Image (cartoon, rainbow, N blue to C red):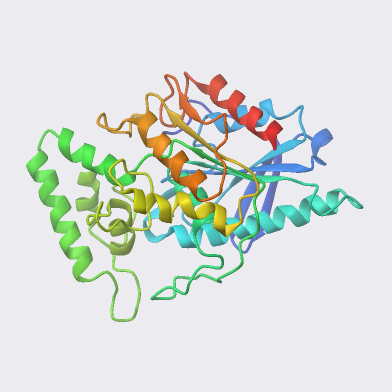
Amino acid sequence: MAPSPDRGLSHRGVLHEYAPRLVAFEFTQPASVNKPNSLIFVGGLTDGFCTVPYVSKLAEALEPTDWSVFSILLSSSYNGFGVGSLDKDVEEIGHCVRYIRDLKASRQPGAPSKSAKIVVMGHSTGSQDVLHYIHAPNPLPKPEFDIGLEHIVRPELDGAIMQAPVSDREAVLAIMKSATNPSEVRGAFDQLVSSAKKQPWTEEGNDTLLPMNMTAKLGLPGDAPLSARRFLSLTSPDSPASPSQDDLFSSDLSDKRHQETFGAVGSRGILQSKLLALYSGSDEWCPAWVDKEKLMQRWKQALEAGGASWAEQSGIVPGASHNVRDEGQRDLIDRVLGYLESI
């Protein structure tokens, strides 16, 4: 979750409708509208335009280059995350990638179709979107119930970046352990799990919504509707033995799980270059028991064993908070710029 900006700011750019009711904001100056390459930024839970402070700074740093930055809104942005899914997110990201490829081609008449590069960068739960995009079957399998997926073939990406890839499940566990009334919070969690498992769907095949006064006790937004289906995916109560779709980054997942996720990237063939992973050194949503270096090494091993490549700019950003509000911004931006130059 990202706090609101400290002050009002304005940003020059272009708002694009990349699909019906879905938009992306391109940070751009009039003189640089014809940049061939694109970085698409995907926020985390509760994020939307301008909620992650380093995005505009990254766009400024890329101004002298051939890269423009797009901040994308998904149907799961802001308070829509509770009724969304990784499947739906990556379908919408795929539509945006295709839209931007066509847009950049129209701005560069006569240029080779593969000359423009597109990289997707995810923050927090947006990192789950990034990994899901590049490792899940393409197209996605048909879901048990229709949740608005079109089963498109997701376009290839020239690069992929995961920033602050923390585990939502472990963040909730940490909240329960550190609560002033842990028994009450644990009781609320157990009650929600029982209720969600009992009736994840209505008889008509629609999402069942959980009581918001209960989900708020777990540190989740008290004004955001949360479906039983997404709650079980985010908190993954049967992990690590049987992890949910959203449980990609927990520190206790097995090597087999990593083989199914990071290890599947190479065989999918969607990612055309290396994967960049940037973990915040002082991430407030990462529990103290997580060994970040060891965890990232396991991801790297699984990724490379499956035939994909790990970017050399990957690593821990010293002192950085979850959304890199202050310390670590320059380091983060330098790593991203170096990665973009490499591809």
Q: Which x, y percent locates residue 101? A: 74, 54
Q: Nearer the viewer, residue 239 or 311?
A: 311
Res. 247 visible in picture? no
Location of the C terminus by quadrant is: top right
Q: Is residue 159 left or right of residue 6?
A: right
Q: Which x, y percent locates residue 105? A: 82, 53
Q: Which x, y percent locates residue 45? A: 41, 46
Q: Residue at x 28, y 63 (%)?
A: 228
Please tell me whether residue 203 is drawn above or below residue 155 in the rendered image: below
Please tell me whether residue 224 is drawn above or below residue 27 in the rendered image: below
Task: Pick out the residue farthest to the bottom.
Answer: 204
Q: Is residue 260 left or right of residue 182?
A: right
Q: Which x, y percent locates residue 254? A: 31, 49
Task: Pick out the residue farthest to the front.
Answer: 305
Q: Nearer the viewer, residue 55 or 162?
A: 162
Please tell me whether residue 204 is drawn above or below residue 197 in the rendered image: below
Please tell me whether residue 251 is drawn above or below residue 150 in the rendered image: above
Q: Is residue 155 left or right of residue 206?
A: right
Q: Nearer the viewer, residue 72 or 241?
A: 241
User: Looking at the rendering, which quadrant does residue 321 occupy?
Assistant: top left
